[in-house]
Amino acid sequence: VASICVGAFTLAEAGLLDGQRATTHWLATDELARRHPAVDVDADALFTDNGQILTSAGASAGLDMCLHIVERDYGVAVAADAARLAVAPLQRTGGQGQFILRNRPTYRTATLEKALSWIEENAHRPLTLADIATAAGMSSRTLARRFHAETGQSPIQWLTGVRVRHAQELLEVTDHTVDRIAAQVGFLSPSNFRTQFTQTVGVNPAAYRKTFRPSPR
């Protein structure tokens, strides 16, 4: 296998990823993009393959990448045998987006701490931009500007991320139905919840629960 499999930061610093798609562990994707704007950072990918240069998103994603290399170079039958020997799926459902805890309460900014704490405690309510602005003691326009500058998101995008994180936690630790969880975390309808969750996490709520709350043996 004539491929280079080393860290994305090392490759980027050497200029080998300029104009190329790449990934790394989700905790470091923002930093990779900040340091190397010429790199097309895919924060959701488990691995990327640009021909001779591959990048992966962590230890288990490295196994996904290795199985991909075997399949690419020797065919799916050989790769399937390798996957069985490794006791691993040949291809995993979804990307690394399902492992990310979004908009965590530990996130702090100088001007938004009050607003972020309030959203964390009230995300289950049917909130509007005006509600968040009032709680933050700002105009809606000022709030939107500061959110974009300090988080890269709008207030409503941040709110959705918090709701999705709360839903992930409930999917992991409860047997509540998906519809019940949708209502508990603040989504107005189960269908909207499923859409927003899937777009954010990369898999639907049922698939997420299957991965992170397996059935008892």
Image (spheres, rainbow, N blue to C red):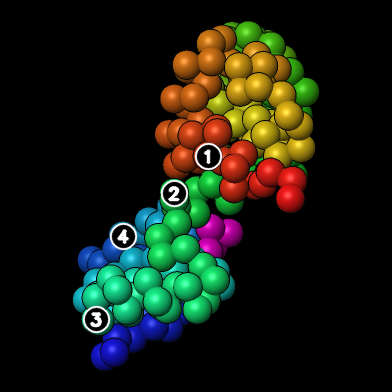
Instruction: Give the Cα separation between the discs numbered 3 and 1.
Output: 30 Å
- Number of other residues with Cα within 10 Å of mark 4, as a class: few under 14, some 14 to 19, many 20 or more: some
First of labels 4, 1 by sequence position: 4
Cα separation, mark 1 vs mark 2, equals: 9 Å
User: Marks 2 and 3, how far apart in space?
Assistant: 23 Å
Residue where numbered disc 2 is placed: 94
Q: Amino acid at mark 4?
A: Asp
Q: Residues within 10 Å of mark 2 (few under 14, many from 20)?
A: some
Identity of the residue drawn at 29% across and 63% down: 21
Label of residue 73 in the image: 3
Q: Mark 2 belongs to which amino acid?
A: Gly
Looking at numbered disc 1 in the image, what kind of residue is underneath it? Ala
Image mark for residue 40: 4
Residue at 49 percent across and 34 percent down: it is: 204
- Could you tell me which residue is drawn at 54 percent across and 47 percent down? 98
Which residues, given as a range, are shown in magenta?
23-28
- Which residue corresponds to mark 1? 207
Of residues 23 and 131, the one nearer the viewer is 23
Q: Earlier in the sequence, mark 3 or mark 4?
A: 4
66 and 140: which is toward the camera: 66
